[in-house]
């Protein structure tokens, strides 16, 4: 039983000061991250310039998603075992964190291990989605002039 508890504790992600079920503003829709190709940053002998706000937004998401690191943190629990896609729309950075399949060899098979973040220019997490979740926020109920999903509301009259 102790071994099971330790394994479960090792699988949990650190979620900063927020409760694990904190999602933020669900009206913020994440953009489709794979509609356009991305520029790969990190090639050999290349110079790159990262905007400070972008760097801070990525750092905030990474610190929220990953637990505190120690020498015993397994490969799949480290930021370097993941890829990051960032899209900026106005004053919001949308960040997708997903596992790099070849980063940990055969020791890591990810299932719903990624996360999506919406982070403001000032570094506040506006929305967080960990694991599998639909791309768009749920639609509000269809209400129009007293009709809810095709049923007329009569105020309780028989």
Image (tube, helix red, strand yellow):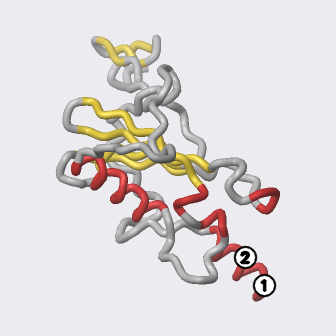
Query: Closest to the observer: 107 or 5?
Result: 107
Q: Tell me if 103 is positioned left or right of 23 in this view.
A: right
Q: Circles 1 and 2: CB distance less than 8 Å?
A: yes
Query: Can residue 137 be seen in the rendering of this structure?
Result: yes
| Residue at image point 24% right, 54% down | 124
* Percent x, y of residue 69: 51, 76
* Percent x, y of residue 131: 58, 48
Query: Could you tell me how far apart the alpha carbons at marks 1 and 2 are, in whole angstroms?
Result: 6 Å
Query: Can residue 116 be seen in the rendering of this structure?
Result: no
Q: Which residue is mark 1?
A: 3
Mark 2 secondary-structure assignment: helix
Mark 1 secondary-structure assignment: helix
Query: Quick check: 28 above or below 52?
Result: above
Q: Residues within 10 Å of mark 2 (few under 14, many from 20)?
A: few
- Please give the label number shown on residue 80: none
Q: Quadrant of the N terminus?
A: bottom right
Q: Number of numbered discs present? A: 2
* Percent x, y of residue 146: 31, 16
Query: Closest to the observer: 136 or 80?
Result: 80
Query: Quick check: 20 above or below 69?
Result: above
Q: Residue 6: which quarter of the image?
A: bottom right
| Residue at image point 57% right, 47% down | 98
* Percent x, y of residue 74: 66, 72
Q: Quadrant of the C terminus?
A: top left
Query: Quick check: 121 above or below 35?
Result: below
Query: Quick check: 121 above or below 14?
Result: above
- Please give the label number shown on residue 7: 2
Q: Tell me if 128 is positioned left or right of 98 in this view.
A: left
| Residue at image point 52% right, 51% down | 130
Query: Closest to the observer: 82 or 40?
Result: 40
| Residue at image point 47% right, 29% down | 38
Q: Residue 154: which quarter of the image?
A: top left
């Amino acid at each position: 039983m102790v071994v099971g508890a330790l394994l479960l504790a090792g699988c949990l992600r650190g979620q900063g000061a927020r409760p694990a079920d904190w999602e933020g503003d669900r009206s913020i829709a994440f953009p489709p991250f794979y509609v356009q190709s991305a520029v790969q940053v990190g090639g050999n002998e290349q110079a790159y310039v990262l905007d400070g706000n972008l760097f801070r937004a990525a750092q905030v998401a990474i610190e929220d998603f990953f637990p505190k690191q120690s020498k015993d943190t397994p490969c799949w629990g480290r930021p370097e075992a993941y890829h990051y896609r960032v899209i900026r729309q106005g004053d919001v950075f949308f960040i997708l964190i997903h596992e790099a399949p070849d980063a940990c060899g055969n020791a890591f098979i990810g299932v719903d291990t990624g996360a999506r973040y919406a982070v403001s220019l000032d570094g506040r997490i506006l929305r967080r989605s960990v694991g599998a979740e639909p791309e768009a926020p749920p639609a509000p109920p269809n209400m129009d002039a007293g009709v809810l999903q095709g049923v007329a509301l009569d105020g309780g009259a028989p």
